[in-house]
Image (cartoon, helix red, strand yellow):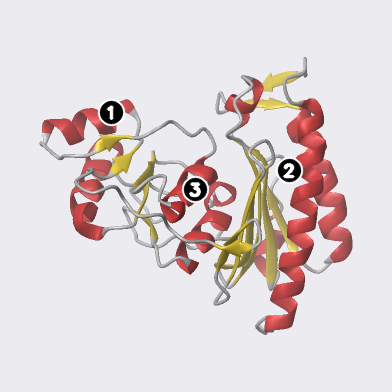
């Protein structure tokens, strides 16, 4: 497979940034309105807004890059993507449950994957007016400015939101930290480790490529590694798109403890994902 040139990657970033902003406008038009909703097989909600954004992104991005594969939460998976040099990975609305409840912490997530790794990624939070973006080797940006992590307050423990089962296990082990704010969009939660709003972000087992790909690149460009606690840094655009429990942290001091707790709570798959 040929590798994308720097110019091609920059063009892809410009394309997905523009598409994400337009998609955010579409989603905002449905936000805090009486929208039609359904429940998917995995018991998660989906709305007419998710489908409208997915339809727009599919039409827009695939028209511009017809040779790219396509993987979206709201489109039936076509394994022909495995034969493509590059693939769009899309979450039309990440944090749909919060979106439907009127919470502002939802995002539009788009990335371009090449050889299992993201080379361009955007996480856009329209209501918060925050657009996070990165290209491989080119740094990460927030609203067009280099993304810089704010300093932690002196003597403050690491800030980490987590599911209740994880909190209970951490506390039982005597691990000291500060419970962080809930952020419904997993992608937005992860990039808050890069901003310094959070020091550690975790996710239960089962996150999929579209939840992670864009934010993993943004974190990597900030020197922060996103890891599947069962098998290390995630590889994207495989036949199996689900991942084990996920952790990202600015300081590796608690890495072993956090990974061990997540494996204890959620386990690892019996075969490699």
Q: Residue furthest front?
A: 154
Q: Which residue is mark 3?
A: 242
Q: Please rate how many residues cluster around mark 2, counting C-alpha atoms within 10 Å: few if below 14, some from 14 to 19, many from 20.
A: some
Residue shown at the point (50%, 41%) measured from the top left: 186
Q: Which residue is mark 1?
A: 165
Could you say whether the residue bearing mark 2 is in a helix, strand or loop? Answer: loop
Q: Please rate how many residues cluster around mark 3, counting C-alpha atoms within 10 Å: few if below 14, some from 14 to 19, many from 20.
A: some
Q: Please rate how many residues cluster around mark 1, counting C-alpha atoms within 10 Å: few if below 14, some from 14 to 19, many from 20.
A: few
Mark toward the start of the polypeptide (1 vs 3)? 1
Q: Please state if 44 lies on the left or on the right of 83 as rendered.
A: left
Task: Indicate the position of residue 68 as horizontal and vertical percent values.
Answer: 76, 66
Q: Please state if 176 lies on the left or on the right of 106 as rendered.
A: left
Residue shown at the point (72%, 61%) measured from the top left: 80
Disc 2/disc 3 C-alpha distance (Å): 16 Å
Q: Please state if 158 lies on the left or on the right of 29 as rendered.
A: left
Disc 1/disc 2 C-alpha distance (Å): 32 Å
Q: Which residue is mark 2?
A: 75
Image height check: is 160 above or below 134? Answer: above
Image height check: is 182 above or below 262? Answer: above
Could you say whether the residue bearing mark 1 is in a helix, strand or loop? Answer: helix
In the depicted view, which residue is nearer to us: 239 or 202?
A: 202
Residue shown at the point (31%, 53%) measured from the top left: 229
Mark toward the start of the polypeptide (2 vs 3)? 2
Q: Quadrant of the N terminus?
A: bottom right
Q: Are marks 1 and 2 in contact (CB under 8 Å)?
A: no
Task: Indicate the position of residue 234 as horizontal and vertical percent values.
Answer: 45, 60
In the depicted view, which residue is nearer to us: 118 or 193?
A: 193
Q: Quadrant of the C terminus?
A: bottom left
Mark toward the start of the polypeptide (1 vs 2)? 2
């Amino acid at each position: 497979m040929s590798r994308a040139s720097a110019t091609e990657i920059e063009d892809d970033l410009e394309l997905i940034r523009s598409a994400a902003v337009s998609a955010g406008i579409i989603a905002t038009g449905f936000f805090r309105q009486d929208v039609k909703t359904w429940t998917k097989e995995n018991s998660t909600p989906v709305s007419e807004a998710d489908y409208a954004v997915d339809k727009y992104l599919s039409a827009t991005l695939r028209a511009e890059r017809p040779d790219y594969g396509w993987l979206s939460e709201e489109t039936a998976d076509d394994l022909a993507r495995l034969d493509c040099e590059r693939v769009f990975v899309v979450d039309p609305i990440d944090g749909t449950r919060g979106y439907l409840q009127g919470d502002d912490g939802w995002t539009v997530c788009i990335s371009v994957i090449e050889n299992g790794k993201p080379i361009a990624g955007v996480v856009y939070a329209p209501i918060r007016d925050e657009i996070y973006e990165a290209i491989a080797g080119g740094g990460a940006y927030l609203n067009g400015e280099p993304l810089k992590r704010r300093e932690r307050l002196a003597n403050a423990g690491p800030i980490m939101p987590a599911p209740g089962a994880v909190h209970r296990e951490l506390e039982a082990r005597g691990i000291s930290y500060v419970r962080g704010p809930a952020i419904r969009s997993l992608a937005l939660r992860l990039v808050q480790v890069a901003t310094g709003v959070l020091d550690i972000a975790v996710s239960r087992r089962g996150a999929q490529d579209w939840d992670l790909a864009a934010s993993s690149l943004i974190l990597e460009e900030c020197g922060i590694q996103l890891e599947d606690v069962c098998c290390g840094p995630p590889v994207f655009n495989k036949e199996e798109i689900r991942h084990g429990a996920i952790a990202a942290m600015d300081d590796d001091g608690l890495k072993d403890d956090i990974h061990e707790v997540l494996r204890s709570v959620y386990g690892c798959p019996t075969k490699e994902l």
